[in-house]
Image: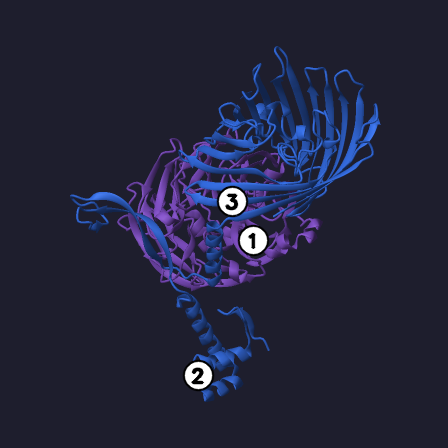
Chain colours: A blue, B purple
């Protein structure tokens, strides 16, 4: 018979059998007494009460583990002889030291293990993986037949991330990416807007590429962030909350990055981000703009951006950014560009975005880029973490060429680490002096991240 | 008649009825805060209570002089978690997490007057509005101990919870709501009978959860707290795993709206004017401002890691991140308004705000200090050696008395 399912220190239900055994074990009664108790309910109750009190005392006062200790930074005063004082004395100087102290706290085994694991994790290199498979099919709907018509494509990519804490507010990060397969863009030569952003700004498809490798440190109460190494400047400039990630949002590159930024590849550089966590942020970056350059000074790509967080007209939060860039890598006319990137939440689930960019492309003329669209998240979706969006991008080139690319996607959040999304792209492209062509590109994307 | 007015009248009737039937209750409810001239702590409203987890004591800091005027040692390895003053200021209570006991301290003398065995690992607690009952949540025991402040004994242990954390009483004291961190429901307690009446599911677990056993079966991060609106009509219960805030109508204990916020919201904090419920979303390091009039998210902004609390003062919200920063937001424009660095390599815990809404008293555990922050100027002043590992603070009648 179970007398009471009160939990003991051992988290076991207390039964009559265990009560009797524990009474004996704790020396609360001799055999005769125990036998008497077994036949006398009142005596048994008294024994149970005594036992419960003993258990309570055990739970209340017994130290079940060694005392917790921690090392603490301490300000002390040290005299000329090296004698340390807790308080200031004549002839002493204030010094900083570290000392272990005991915390009079009963630490559970669970806590101890958790702390040890966290500490081990903190001191070693963290590894993350992001794997993607993108399948696309191109069907031409208009114009002179192109090579890609009727072709299917599959691209598999894997990013390996490495992060390690080096010092106070200083981390090292590296991203190795390898991808295999093909995208429609390889057969759409001359098309100004890429349908698939996975391979953009990487040097060698079908090889392992070092996408990024940098060291970041934070200064001035962590308001100024300095990042140096091999950089992907699109992580810091022209960002957008709903159109900035080919792995979870749009696949089409012009709906990820403004092509007027003119970043053809990642390279060595330095970025400074000043963010006092108020309304404004200021970002400045320089990067080697050409992989072929033999020195940095002749291939400098410089970029500056001002960002502002706002709630205009009582709307929800919005991010407004304006950037300007200059590239000195080519001889001849200057190569400046500027643009804006905006995302504005209209309702808690509905966000609109827009980009504009203009870049020098000749003596007195420039290419122009426009994009816009919206995203639904936390509303009008199947599962809570899903999102879907619609975007349109347009480019007008100096030579008269133009292209309009639109995309709609639905990203299904299957599990914490697995997503499946369906995409449909439609593009109309008119090369200079050529007939318009149009094509439709349905696609699927699997994304797994660890 | 509008529903708010109806509720107000109903609450008044209920309170009046209980006053008539319970003389002790009438005495408490009718009494103002009593000061005790000549006592160690003559005015309970003039001190900050500091929970020193690792020196196992409750410290009393004089607000004016910043001196620690008294410390009440609870016993070895007690490790108190949260403290609260009774509505009349006569007692301070705390739960000793490692001792499985509740402790009652007389404020005027700072003397420990009673140790009461309760359930496993007592942490968060609350007083009924009349001060008669002290509900102590025991998360490891899945129970709430009901302590009668007259007899200072446990008169009932309410079972059936799943890691009960914070407890919220309705203003009329008829019901108490318990956040279950080990489940996705809020427990409703009938305070008259001290019984678990209902389990309110704040939102459904999505069907797709079956594909994600690692997330949904590995560890549960349910509801920490049900935060009550100023009029007592609605509760805002954030569910960590589901990323939502369920709005519960206290009249019929039904969820009237489910609001999706950022990832892994810890809990909602009510702004003092009642206009916004602010959630700290530790999954994506954001804060969401819920407009309580429309029950929609008015803004979501970036914040910091592992946020533990929000305090409101001088027209601003101060969001605490243990990493050593307070993230500041303008409550009028609902825009970020900077960040206050408290220190490097420290761990800050929670804070309380004085009733005048001028100063924050922030527990800085690894430095054994309490940091006083002027809400208007954002200047800081540190009070050193308050005790070992200050885990939380409490000021009588503060609207920001909470724990993490």
Q: Is residue A200 above or below residue B50?
A: above
Q: Which callout, 3 or 1, points to the residue nearer the camera?
A: 3
Q: Is residue B200 visible?
A: yes
Q: Is residue B32 visible?
A: no
Q: Residues within 10 Å of mark 1 (few under 14, many from 20)?
A: many
Between A449 and A320, the one nearer to me in the picture? A449
Residue A144 located left or right of residue B366: right
Q: Classify mark 1: helix, strand or loop.
A: loop
To which residue does mark 2 refer? Answer: A29
Residues flagged by tags 2 and 1 on a common chain:
no
To which residue does mark 1 refer? Answer: B181
Q: Chain of mark 2?
A: A
Locate residue A321, reporting x and y percent.
Answer: 56, 24
Q: Classify mark 2: helix, strand or loop.
A: loop
Q: Residue at (50%, 78%) from the top-left corner?
A: A45
Residue A215: which numbered mark, if any?
A: none
């Amino acid at each position: 018979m179970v007398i009471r399912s009160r939990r003991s220190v051992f988290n076991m239900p207390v039964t009559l059998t265990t009560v009797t055994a524990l009474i004996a074990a704790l020396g609360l009664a001799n055999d005769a007494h125990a036998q008497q108790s077994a036949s006398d309910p009142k005596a048994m109750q008294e024994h149970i009460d005594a036992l419960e009190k003993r258990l309570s005392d055990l739970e209340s006062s017994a130290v079940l583990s060694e005392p917790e200790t921690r090392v603490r930074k301490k300000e002390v005063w040290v005299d000329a002889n090296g004698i340390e004082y807790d308080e200031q004395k004549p002839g002493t100087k204030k010094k900083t030291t570290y000392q272990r102290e005991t915390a009079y706290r009963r630490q559970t085994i669970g806590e101890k293990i958790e702390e040890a694991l966290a500490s081990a994790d903190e001191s070693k290199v963290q590894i993350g993986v992001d794997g993607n498979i993108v399948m696309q099919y191109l069907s031409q709907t208009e114009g002179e037949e192109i090579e890609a018509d009727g072709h299917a494509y599959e691209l598999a990519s894997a990013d390996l991330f490495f992060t390690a804490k080096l010092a106070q507010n200083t981390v090292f990060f590296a991203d190795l990416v390898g991808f295999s397969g093909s995208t429609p863009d390889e057969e759409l030569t001359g098309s100004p807007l890429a349908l698939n952003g996975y391979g953009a700004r990487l040097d060698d498809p079908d090889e392992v590429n070092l996408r990024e490798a940098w060291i970041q440190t934070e200064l001035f109460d962590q308001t100024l962030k300095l990042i140096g190494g091999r950089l992907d400047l699109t992580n810091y400039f022209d960002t957008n909350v709903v159109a900035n990630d080919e792995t979870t949002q749009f696949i089409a590159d012009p709906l990820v990055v403004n092509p007027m930024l003119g970043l053809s590849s990642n390279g060595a550089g330095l970025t400074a981000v000043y963010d006092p966590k108020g309304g404004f942020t200021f970002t400045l970056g320089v990067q080697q703009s050409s992989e072929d350059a033999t020195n940095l000074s002749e291939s400098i790509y410089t970029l500056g951006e001002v960002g502002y967080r706002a709630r205009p007209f009582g709307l929800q939060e919005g991010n407004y950014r304006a950037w300007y860039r200059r590239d000195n890598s080519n001889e001849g006319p200057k190569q400046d560009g500027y643009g804006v990137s905006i995302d504005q939440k209209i309702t808690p689930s509905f966000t609109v975005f827009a980009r504009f960019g203009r870049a020098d492309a000749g003596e007195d003329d420039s290419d122009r880029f426009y994009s816009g669209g919206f995203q639904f998240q936390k509303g009008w979706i199947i599962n809570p973490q899903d999102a879907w969006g619609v975007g349109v991008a347009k480019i007008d080139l100096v030579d008269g060429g133009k292209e309009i690319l639109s995309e709609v996607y639905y990203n299904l959040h299957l599990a914490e680490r697995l997503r499946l999304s369906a995409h449909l792209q439609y593009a109309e492209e008119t090369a200079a002096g050529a007939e318009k062509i149009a094509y439709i590109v349905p696609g699927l994307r699997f994304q797994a991240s660890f | 008649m509008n529903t708010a007015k109806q509720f107000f009248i109903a609450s008044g009737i209920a309170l009046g009825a209980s006053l008539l039937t319970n003389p002790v209750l009438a005495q408490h409810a009718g009494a103002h805060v009593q000061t005790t001239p000549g006592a160690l702590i003559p005015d309970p409203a003039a001190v900050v209570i500091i929970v020193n987890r690792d020196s196992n004591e409750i410290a009393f800091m004089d607000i004016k002089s910043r001196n620690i005027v008294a410390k009440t040692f609870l016993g070895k390895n007690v490790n108190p978690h949260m403290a609260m003053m009774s509505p009349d200021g006569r007692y301070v209570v705390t739960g000793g997490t490692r001792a499985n006991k509740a402790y009652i301290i007389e404020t005027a003398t700072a003397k420990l007057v009673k140790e009461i065995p309760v359930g496993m690992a007592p942490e968060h607690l609350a007083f009924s509005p009349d001060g008669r009952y002290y509900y102590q949540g025991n998360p490891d025991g899945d129970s709430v101990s009901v302590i009668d402040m007259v007899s200072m004994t446990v008169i009932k242990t309410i079972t059936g919870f799943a890691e009960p954390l914070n407890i919220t009483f309705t203003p009329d004291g008829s019901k108490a709501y318990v956040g279950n961190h080990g489940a996705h429901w809020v427990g409703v307690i009938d305070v008259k009978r001290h019984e678990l009446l209902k389990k309110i599911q704040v939102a459904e677990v999505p069907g797709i959860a079956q594909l994600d056993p690692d997330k949904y079966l590995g560890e549960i991060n349910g509801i920490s707290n049900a935060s009550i609106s100023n009029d007592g009509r609605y509760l805002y219960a954030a569910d960590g795993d589901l990323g939502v805030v369920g709005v519960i109508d206290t009249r019929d204990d039904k969820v009237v709206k489910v609001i999706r916020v950022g990832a892994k919201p810890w809990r909602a904090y009510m702004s003092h004017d009642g206009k916004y419920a602010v959630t700290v979303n530790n999954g994506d390091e954001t804060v969401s401002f819920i407009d309580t009039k429309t029950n929609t998210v008015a803004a979501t902004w970036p914040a910091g890691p592992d946020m533990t609390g929000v305090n409101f003062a001088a027209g601003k919200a101060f969001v605490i991140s243990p990493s050593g920063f307070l993230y500041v937001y303008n409550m009028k424009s609902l825009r970020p308004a900077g960040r206050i660095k408290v220190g490097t390599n420290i761990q800050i815990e929670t804070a309380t705000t004085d009733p005048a809404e001028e100063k924050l008293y922030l527990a800085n555990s690894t430095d054994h200090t309490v940091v006083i922050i002027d809400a208007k100027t954002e200047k800081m002043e540190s009070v050193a050696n308050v005790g070992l590992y200050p885990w939380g603070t409490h000021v009588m009648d503060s609207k920001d008395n909470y724990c993490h």
